[in-house]
């Protein structure tokens, strides 16, 4: 199995529902996202997919969140905008955009330099 990964970032605000602590208040993050995809076959150029194409697809997913109040953005208007839920959402969004034969392997979302959450699909 081959894999590629790219990183990008976006800025957004949120407030956690049902949480007691400072994160229940409105605050923002400069989120960093690592997307890792996988596949079994390389193309005729010997690539899983061009890095530029993967970066474009990840950026499409992040543009829907950038400079937004996540609590008012689908699906976070209905689910809590935690880092865990954000990682799952990006996993699903990127997966729906990938060419046939490619799968999302993992999404990791950092809300600060030292704190990250990830999602790698169902067991």
Image: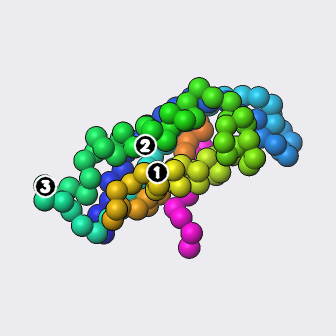
Q: Is residue 38 left or right of residue 16?
A: left
Question: Residue 101 or 31: which is nearer the viewer?
Answer: 101
Q: Mark 2 points at which residue?
A: 58
Disc 1 crowd, CA 10 A, few/some/many (<14, 14-19, 20+): many
| Magenta segment boundaries in residue numbering | 115-123
Residue 56 point in image, percent of width and height: 36, 39
Q: In which quarter of the image is residue 24?
A: top right
Query: Extreme bottom residue here?
Result: 123
Q: Is residue 97 left or right of residue 69?
A: left
Q: Which residue is drawn at 55% across and 42% down?
A: 110
- Write down the residue under mark 3: 45
**Residue 30: percent from the left, percent from the top?**
56, 30
Task: Tell me the crowding category of disc 3: few under 14, some 14 to 19, or many 20 or more residues within 10 angstroms, Cα based.
Answer: few
Disc 2 secondary structure class: helix
According to the picture, the residue beneath numbered tag 1 turns out to be 94
Q: Earlier in the sequence, mark 1 or mark 2?
A: 2
Residue count near mark 2 (Cα–Cα under 10 Å), binned few <14, some 14–19, many ≥20: many
């Amino acid at each position: 199995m081959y894999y590629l990964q790219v990183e990008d970032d976006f800025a957004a605000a949120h407030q956690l529902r049902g949480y007691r602590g400072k994160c229940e208040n409105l605050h923002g993050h400069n989120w960093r996202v690592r997307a890792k995809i996988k596949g079994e076959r390389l193309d005729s150029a010997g690539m899983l997919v061009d890095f530029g194409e993967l970066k474009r697809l990840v950026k499409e997913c992040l543009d829907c969140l950038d400079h937004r109040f996540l609590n008012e953005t689908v699906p976070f208007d209905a689910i809590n905008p935690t880092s865990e839920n954000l990682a799952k959402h990006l996993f699903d969004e990127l997966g729906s955009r990938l060419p046939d034969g490619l799968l999302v392997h993992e999404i990791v979302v950092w809300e600060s330099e030292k704190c990250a959450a990830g999602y790698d699909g169902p067991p």
